[in-house]
Amino acid sequence: MKLRCLLIDDEPAALRVLQSHIANVNGLEIVAQCKNAIEAIDVLHENPVDLIFLDIKMPKLLGTDFLRNLSNPPKIIFVTAYSEYAMEGFELDAVDYLLKPVSFERFIKAISKAKRMMGHEVQTHTEEYKANPEAFVYLKVEKNMQKVFVNDILYIESWKDYIKVFLTDGNSVMAKQSISSIENLLSNHRFLRVHRSYIVAINKVKGFNNLYIQLPLNEVPIGRLYKQAVMDAIQSR
């Protein structure tokens, strides 16, 4: 049974890092994402949630005040850029306290702790992922839905309201779609968001450094907020 997770953070980049980490851990699913604690109250009224990833310094209502007002809260992992809140977080019986930017290694430790407290075990996709050569997605290309095999995708670049999908044969496909939507479509496959504008196929990575992911036909930049998560995810494979 998967742990149902709620993400609460007013920073889109921080949410994307958590999405990437969660996609690489078996037994987790995202119920909803909220940009403030007020939105989260409605989500909790309508959905069962096992674990909340909670930012502290947010508009409208601090994460700590939000937690104090919950009569029967789920397990909480604080995720914040402010270390001075750590003591207060632990006083509220938080499972863990993660400082941004959150590395994949540190994320796994927090998840392992939460799962032990709830009687679960943690596994990464590395342990049980099996590539399906027949897996495909449909992309909206002009007026048609075009079939693209997942194994043929090298990397994806965001172009405002479009995405450009670069293929292993050197060709590319321009589709009317957001990069977040294609990230969700590929969440069960080995793809990693490395920048707000780029997603790469992990099994196509030839090498990397502090600035770039090296692919067979190109280099892709690593975003500052994604850096540690990218390094951890690639090296764990």
Image (cartoon, helix red, strand yellow):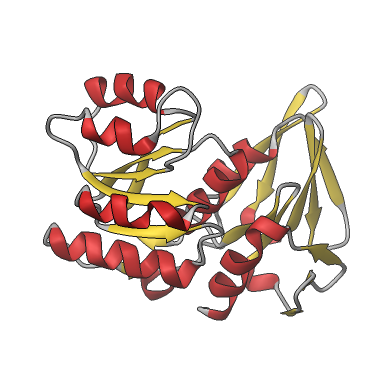
Number of marks present in the image shown: 0
Instruction: Using the image, determine if residue 82 lies above or below residue 176.
Output: below
Kindly tell me whether residue 80 is visible in this rendering. Answer: yes
In this view of the protein, which residue sits in the foreground, 68 or 173?
Answer: 68
Q: Could you say which is closer to the camera, residue 51 or residue 82?
A: 82
> Does 214 appear above or below 198?
below
Please tell me in which quadrant of the rendered image residue 32 appears.
Answer: top left
Residue 91 to residue 15: above or below = below
Q: Residue at x 73, y 58 (%)?
A: 223
Q: Which residue lies at the image location 40% right of the left edge and 26% below the top edge? A: 61
Counting from the top left corner in percent of width and height, residue 193 is at 64, 55
Q: Where does the image place residue 12, in percent across and percent down from the top left?
A: 60, 39
Q: Residue at x 31, y 57 (%)?
A: 87
Is residue 153 visible to the viewer in this orientation of the structure?
no
- Whole-percent x and y of residue 9? 48, 38
Give the x, y percent position of residue 37.
39, 28
Task: Determine whether, in the image, residue 70 is placed left or right of residue 176.
Answer: left
Residue found at x 37% / y 75%: 127
